[in-house]
Amino acid sequence: MAAILPLPEAALAAVYLVASVLFIQGLRDMTHPRTAPRGNLISAGGMALAVGVTVLNTDILSPILLFAALLVGTAIGGWLAATVETTEMPQLVGLFNGFGGGASALVAGAELTGMFTEGSFAVGVTATAALAGIIGSVTFWGSMVAAGKLHGVINDSAVRYDGEQVVKGVFLLVAVLAGIQLVVRPNLFGPMPGWVPSYWVLVAAASVLGVLLVIPIGGADMPVVIALLNSYSGLAAATTGFVLGNSVLIVAGTLVGASGLILTVIMCESMNRSLANVFFGGIGESGGDGEEMEDIYEGNITTTSTEEVEMTLDVAQRVVIVPGYGMAVAQAQHAVAELAELLDENDVDVEFGIHPVAGRMPGHMNVLLAEADVPYEKLRDLEEINPTFSQTDVVIVIGANDVVNPSANTADSGPIAGMPVLNVGEARTVIVNKRSLSPGFSGVPNPLFAQDNTNMLFGDAKESMQELVNVYKENH
């Protein structure tokens, strides 16, 4: 099959360079909420350019088949964009990571098969293909388990067992040995007309390893795992780029790998996790039990109503709103934004305290609040807002739990021990809006709920905030 539009090598390299520049500019624009939509479009344009020129310049598939594939992919992407809730973004990102890793492993395998069928043998290409196979397979199966845990189709508890590190080591060793054999003696199993046995042994061992790496990690730590798998998917794409000799794939994969690793480090610091533990799947301790919760909450919980909260806000000069996953689930951001606007109109100083992993993923709360037109200038990071709580009249915590749990500062062990949290308990009055006293993803009881200055406003976040807005409007 002939190429549709063959290009000179220099022209192809120039187009790939333009696409790479668009990727870098798009990533740069995504660092700020205001320019993020533009960054998305620029990056998508770069990808469209790279894919378009590749399919036109090579004889991969027939134009009809390519067009059909693009049509199916576009339809699936449009359906996902229209139907997936923002609260489900972490598991969607997990699936995307997995598809990227799986595609890299399959493309590397296909390239190897073609190479050996033609009788050619290049050590450098074979070695990078083996690396792409290991990283891609680990990424695919690890991502499937992570997405399953986040979506609730797999139990999100940490599955630990004796000798788990040894078992993981065995599968890693099998994958590495298969890769070494592939490089130094690819014809051990005889002629290879249509497939490369060692490569698929490598893929099978790495696939099991991917499952074993994520299974021991509990739901509270899954955001860190998703970020790390994002980095893995980029590395798999970059190594596949070396296999194919495709510069734009190398650049794009490297950018994804580097940004994913930076994100992982930020999240590790935000959750007091060790990067080494994340690499080897060693995080995921169990939380507290029911007896411990009873000891903390029994006789110490003060409930309140929207009318009482409105009266408290009526005399406040400074209010900090702390949004969490519960606000995202209830889609309460618009009611919260309206409340903040009403307070602002009555000369109350209103700010939002945003924990780096609030809502499970960095930036999740920022996106939700931007959707409700909350000015970005009112959003404050953890380090910036924490020193101000002692001068704050009222803190309203909406659907957040682990990120405001003071036991993170006092516990010697446990899932959130040492994790930097928002010290909302230092404010004069704390209003916590939750459906119940149930613990967050960590499973750790929250002593904040039992503090003398804390009032619990039980109920759905959207209904509670809208009712509070209505009461506030009636009295002002």
Image (cartoon, grey):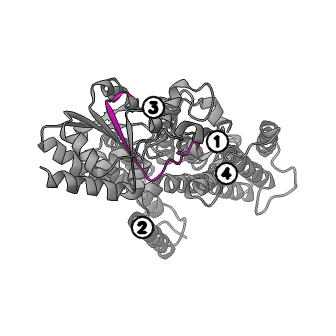
Residue position marked by numbered label 4 in the rendering: 137
Residue position marked by numbered label 1 in the rendering: 291
Q: Residues within 10 Å of mark 3 (few under 14, many from 20)?
A: many
Q: Residues within 10 Å of mark 2 (few under 14, many from 20)?
A: few
Q: Tag 2: residue type?
A: Thr
Q: Select label 4 or label 3 by which is in front.
A: 3
Name above or below for residue 221 compared with residue 86: above
Residue position marked by numbered label 2 in the rendering: 83
Q: Tag 3: residue type?
A: Val
Q: Select label 4 or label 2 by which is in front.
A: 2
Q: Earlier in the sequence, mark 3 or mark 1?
A: 1
Q: Residue at x 50, y 53 (%)?
A: 93
Q: Select label 3 or label 1 by which is in front.
A: 1
Q: Earlier in the sequence, mark 1 or mark 2?
A: 2
Q: CA distance from mark 4 to mark 3?
A: 35 Å
Dot 1 and dot 4 residues touching (CB under 8 Å): no
Q: Residue 377 bears which disc, if any?
A: none
Q: Earlier in the sequence, mark 4 or mark 3?
A: 4
Nearer-the-camera pick, 359 or 309: 309
